[in-house]
Image: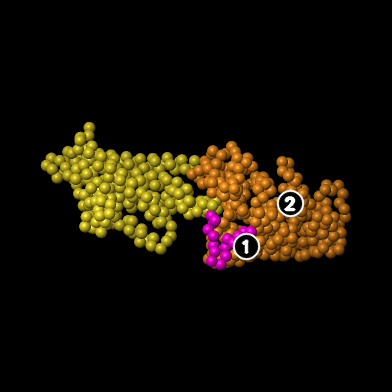
Chain colours: A orange, B yellow
Amino acid sequence: MKALDVDIRLSRGAFQMAAQFSAPADGITVLFGPSGSGKSSLLSAIGGITPADGQIRLGKRALNDSGLNLPPHLRGIGLVFQDARLFPHLTVSQNIAYAWKRAPVDKRPAMDALARFFDITALMERPAGNLSGGEKSRVALARALAAAPDFLLLDEPFAALDGLRRRAFIRVLLDMHKNFHLPMLVVTHSIDDAAAMASNLVALRDGRVVAAGPFDQATRQPAFAAMLDSRDSGAAVSALLLHSGHDPAQRYLWLRADHIVLAMERPVAVSARNILEGEIAAVQTEADGSRLVELLTPVGTILSRVTAEAVVELGLAPGKRAWALVKVHALQD
Amino acid sequence: MLSALEIEVLRTSFSVAFFALLWSLPLAIACAFALSRRFPGRFTLDGLVHLPIILPPVLTGFLLLLLFGRQGPIGHWLEQALGIHLAFTLQGAALATAVMTFPILVRAIRIAFEAMDARLFEAASMLRAGPWDRFFTIALPLAGPGILAGAVTAFAAGMGEFGAVITFAANIPGQTQTLPLAIYAVLQQPNGEGEALRLAALSFTLAMSGLIGAEFLQRWMVRRLKG
């Protein structure tokens, strides 16, 4: 497994990018940012599709350096595009074999195991132009893995999927990461998707990295909070997720400040499971006049949004004890 | 039914059109692919390819004679080095036909390359396919319908080339006398109009079936490619 180190500059017309970050060899790194922040351009540059100045290193191997710009097919990097980009003149199995035949012989994964893993065995002889959105995404993943890359880039591969299939797809990604020991950099603009996958975060805004590091730490940086839509403000807590058919996994959950209700006494007659006791660390005033209350709980710092009146009426102040009620749907994955 | 003369003329026409296509297709594919991308000298190449449409066919034939005739630089070399001479032969007629139908061929194939989704090349490059690999495994198969349609149209048009062929390859029965050249020849004879009309009808039928055939082949291939 190889880490990816990036320190590049590129310009496209008026858009300037200067990005420096590392994606560790172990775990999934999420590249997060609003649309137009340069996420896709950054992936293209790492893949070698668009030339960039600076250094890109995969493990010890230089892909970009002064005077060096390896073409995409020699980089050993895989890229799964938002729109799958299956070859329409080939069947599903021919699409996957296309990658497999070009992979180094000693690294080739078993084709039938790949098909079983992505649940596409029944689709193998179908023309690739004739699949549903979810099927296309799974075939694109299988094809990318068949090329046996050292590092996999994914550009919002689930953008075309609705909520339920999206979450299923994220579980496939997590299982895939575990089974194939493949480091990944995944682009998304959804904080929930980011939390569900990430062990690490790289936040990009206007072509600059504004926050980076382990997901729970990076999301606590003020520059990251500032780039979120106010409805998405919140905090990451670590949780053990249990899915039938999947191994229990330590993941993050994104608790939105809007979904947390505060009480000054231990509430009764509510599902106790969703109550967290803690100490108020700070009360901040937001741009819209609402207040964000920072609560230190045993599972980590969480945020709750309350009105200015509530702060006065409840006497919310640093040092006081409070109970946070987490709405059940905020915990659903 | 067809007379011996008509059968011979048909056979010559088919041979000329066939060899013309055989020699020009690889070069046409290369030119069309080059023209579908941006590179310096693209407009010059584009102009050169389309020159036979603009020039009077007789002039094209004359230029070929100057270049490929026994005294011409290329013709002289071909005869000395390889023992090939083209002027006034069937292969010469094929060369003149190839030059004349080249723009038709390049245009059809170029449109196919330009309509292609360039993002598929990016996808292939991320699956370890190099530039030549991508050309042969992605670009060429996807341009298949365009190449086929261009080839059938060029073949049909090639059977009817006149000016450049008669100038460069003359009008030799059994050698270079294709359909239009035979029509011209019988019209020179007294009371040749009847035979000319028969040949004209033959020529028209072949050209139309070529066009219709190209259309059907293309539709069929596009359906097959889309799955």
Q: Of marks 2 and 1, which one's residue comes earlier in the chain?
A: 1
Q: Residue B195's spot in the image, x, y percent? A: 18, 39
Task: Note whether residue B180 is visible.
Answer: no
Estimate the spatial distance between the alpha carbons at disc 2 and disc 1, rounded to whole Å.
Answer: 26 Å
Residue B195 is one of the magenta-drawn residues: no
Q: Which residue is drawn at 38% across and 54% down?
A: B31
Q: Nearer the viewer, residue B136 or A13?
A: B136
Per the rendered image, the range of residues in magenta is A57-74
Residue marked by disc 2: A251
Q: Which amino acid does label 1 sit on?
A: Val
Q: Residue B23's spot in the image, x, y percent? A: 33, 49
Left or right placement of residue B88 versus residue A105 in this view: left
Does A128 appear above or below B130?
above
Mark 1: secondary structure: strand
Q: Which residue is drawn at 36% across and 59% down?
A: B45
Q: Are discs 2 and 1 less than 8 Å apart at CB?
A: no
Does B183 appear above or below B122?
above
Q: Are marks 2 and 1 on the same chain?
A: yes
- Packing grade of label 2 (10 A; few <14, some 14-19, many >=20) is some
Q: Which residue is drawn at 86% across and 51% down?
A: A267
Q: Which residue is drawn at 74% across and 58% down?
A: A216
Left or right placement of residue B186 versus residue B222 in this view: left
Mark 2: secondary structure: strand
Q: Which amino acid does label 2 sit on?
A: Arg
Left or right placement of residue A73 versus residue A20 in this view: left
Quarter placement of the N terminus of chain A: bottom right
In the rendered image, the residue lying farthest to the top is B1
Q: Nearer the viewer, residue A30 or B79?
A: B79
Residue marked by disc 1: A6
